[in-house]
Amino acid sequence: MTTQTKALEAPLKISSKHLAVSLTIVFLFITFTSIGLNHVEGESYGWLALLPTSLVLVFALTTHRTVEALFSGTIAGVLLLDPTSAVEQIVGISMDVMMNETIAWIILVCGLMGGLIAILEKGGSILSFSDMLVNKVKSRNQSLLMTFFLGILIFIDDYLNAIAISSSMKKITDGYKVSREKLAYLVDSTAAPICILVPISTWAIFFSSLLEANEVAEPGQGIAAYIQAIPYMAYGWVTLGIVFLVAIGKMPDLGAMKKAEERARNGQVKPDGATDIDFGSDIKAHSNPTMGLSTSYCRWSY
């Protein structure tokens, strides 16, 4: 079986916007270094302390790349504090994060889950599950509701939720001319809230450890404190409510989403320039449509 990844074969396009952003970042880092070198030890940074956070926000909103934005903000903060030992501090911060037991556990779990989804897709299990759902879903609204309810069922981890649901449902939603933007919104805006609200998820474990580490909760009582806070997690409850209204068609499409849906109804579900990661064009559906779910459950239980 030959694997062809179209996303990796796409030619690199450097636009004037990307060049401008890159030059701006270089200029900003030089500015942070200059501020750090000229700062008198012991004096307050004042409003300059807000610059790294501002950089993160502007970078993320401009490029739509959150990981790179956060990393850039970290580097900017280190340069602001002490440019002469920036490399040493960045390495030290990275080591402290990677050696943290909770962070290491989350990285391993998310990596293994992503690998499991890739195996299921390569083996045809996800394709067979999609074929089974095709016979159950009879309308556009049903495809949106199915996406929402599947997102509710897979509450263990938001990354597992997003990867599994998007891989399973895109074939169905494409058939009913649902834009990939709307599918992405439904999947993402269901995954994170449900993982927040269900106390047996990776989110709950992570935040309960933070509550204990910051002495908000007594040792061993982090998960209990997290459960007590669930009724007050407005983001999760409100977001799930809005997603449900969108799925049943009671919430109108606005702005860019409206344009994306109009484009999809004309036959183009994917935005211009979008590329799918192709795990192999010769993949065939598994003979057992529930094999993927059974395998996933067994491996998670193990």
Image: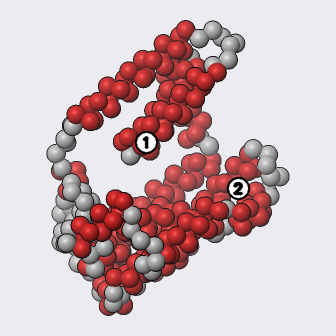
Which is nearer the eye, 160 or 143? 143
- The answer to whether 190 appears left or right of 172 in the picture is right
Q: Position of residue 9 (x, y in %)?
A: 18, 50
- The answer to whether 120 appears left or right of 79 in the picture is left
Q: Give the residue drawn at x 43%, y 42%.
A: 60
Q: Give the residue drawn at x 19%, y 72%.
A: 267
Q: Give the residue drawn at x 16%, y 45%.
A: 11
Q: Identify the image quadrant of residue 169.
A: bottom left
Q: Split into 4 quadrants, where in the image is the C terminus?
A: bottom right
Q: Earlier in the sequence, mark 1 or mark 2?
A: 1
Label 1: which secondary element: helix
Query: Quick check: marks 1 and 2 in contact, CB under 8 Å?
Result: no
Give the residue type that dot 1 points to: Ala
147, above or below 207, in the image: below
146, above or below 103, in the image: below
Q: Is residue 71 visible?
A: no
Q: Position of residue 188 (x, y in %)?
A: 46, 63
Q: Position of residue 208 (x, y in %)?
A: 70, 55
Few, some or many residues within 10 Å of mark 1 (<14, 14–19, 20+): some
- The answer to whether 52 appears left or right of 270 in the picture is right
Q: How many marks?
A: 2
Which is nearer the eye, 18 or 242? 242
Q: Give the residue drawn at x 46%, y 77%.
A: 250
Q: Split into 4 quadrants, where in the image is the N terminus?
A: bottom left
Q: Position of residue 154 (x, y in %)?
A: 51, 73
Which residue position is annotated with label 1?
60
Label drawn at residue 119:
none
Which residue position is annotated with label 2?
208
Q: Identify the image quadrant of residue 167.
A: bottom left
Which is nearer the eye, 58 or 153? 58
297, above or below 77, in the image: below
Give the residue type that dot 2 points to: Ser
